[in-house]
């Protein structure tokens, strides 16, 4: 009799464990589904919005290392983040970010994605208001020249740090062709007929636009890149535009 009772108790315990496991699996599946829905829900919004900034105030709002870092963090994986999450990702004090988040909100560069109460405190999550930002300072060249230099310098510096960190940590295949899929650096310099240079630049811009227009896949391969282009001018630039007279 005692043996039968012990068997029943053991069976009941196992049934209870199975129920708990099934419940935990259901909870995990629900969490994954909600996370995927969250990414899918914000993806189309961000994918479709490419913003061109022309006004001085918004350009100046971007001319800050911390604000650019926040915008990159919210644009990179396109998942809403709180000030706490941004602070952890950027290695910055959380209190320092609030002022910068306010400036970005007022400039319309980020927006509130959701708010919720956590331990009695209202937590706000933010997301980028666009997939990418194009800056056109041509309407205010004198007022934005110094600001644009800071923005360009910050972006090149950020990309350089991430690229070098990738080189230091990535294990590249021995095959040179296979290694190209992990990363590469190309440096171009040539004197070309003006019409050829203009055509090449147009095709390069079209290729970048094609890249921007691809639908984002949270489970896909992440690609980081930076494209720059300039035409030197002045006495030392062979074939370039004439420089200012001295």
Image (spheres, grey):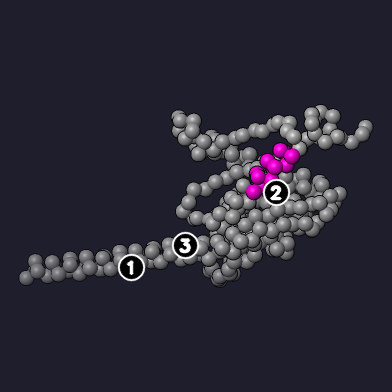
Q: Which residues are magenta?
A: 195-206
Magenta stretch containing residue 152, yes or no? no
Location of the N terminus by quadrant is bottom left
Q: Which residue is mark 2?
A: 65
* Observer-nearest of 62 and 189: 189
Q: Main secondary structure of the magenta part?
A: helix
Which type of secondary structure does the marked residue at label 1 adopt?
A: helix
**Mark 1 Cα shell of 10 Å, populated few (<14), some (14-19), many (≥20):** few
Q: How many marks?
A: 3
Residue at left offset 56%, top offset 36%: 184
Give the number of the disc on residue 138.
Answer: none
Whole-Å distance between the Cαs marked 2 and 3?
A: 31 Å
Task: Tell me which label, 1 or 2, sits earlier in the chain.
Answer: 1
Instruction: Tell me the number on the disc at residue 36.
Output: 3
Q: Residue at the spot x=25%, y=68% of the render?
A: 16
> Of all residues shown, which one is farthest toward the right?
246
Answer left or right for 191 relative to 18: right
């Amino acid at each position: 009799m005692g043996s039968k009772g012990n068997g029943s108790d053991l069976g009941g315990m196992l049934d209870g464990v199975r129920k708990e496991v099934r419940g935990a699996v259901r909870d995990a599946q629900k969490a994954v589904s909600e996370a995927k829905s969250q990414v899918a829900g914000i993806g189309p919004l961000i994918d479709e919005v490419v913003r061109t900034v022309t006004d001085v105030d918004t350009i100046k709002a971007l001319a800050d290392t911390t604000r650019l870092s926040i915008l990159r963090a919210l644009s990179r994986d396109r998942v809403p983040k709180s000030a706490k999450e941004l602070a952890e990702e950027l290695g910055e004090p959380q209190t320092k970010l609030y002022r910068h988040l306010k400036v970005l909100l007022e400039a319309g560069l980020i927006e509130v994605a959701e708010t919720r109460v956590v331990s009695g405190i209202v937590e706000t999550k933010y997301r980028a208001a666009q997939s990418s930002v194009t800056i056109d300072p041509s309407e205010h060249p004198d007022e934005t020249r110094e600001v644009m230099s800071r923005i360009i310098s910050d972006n090149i510096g950020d990309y350089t740090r991430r690229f070098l960190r990738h080189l230091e940590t990535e294990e590249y295949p021995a095959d040179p062709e296979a290694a190209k899929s992990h990363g590469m650096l190309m440096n171009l310099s040539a004197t070309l007929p003006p019409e050829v240079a203009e055509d090449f630049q147009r095709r390069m811009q079209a290729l970048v636009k094609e890249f921007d227009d691809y639908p984002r896949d949270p489970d896909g391969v992440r690609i980081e890149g930076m494209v720059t282009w300039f035409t030197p001018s002045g006495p030392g630039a062979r074939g370039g535009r004439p420089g200012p007279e001295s």
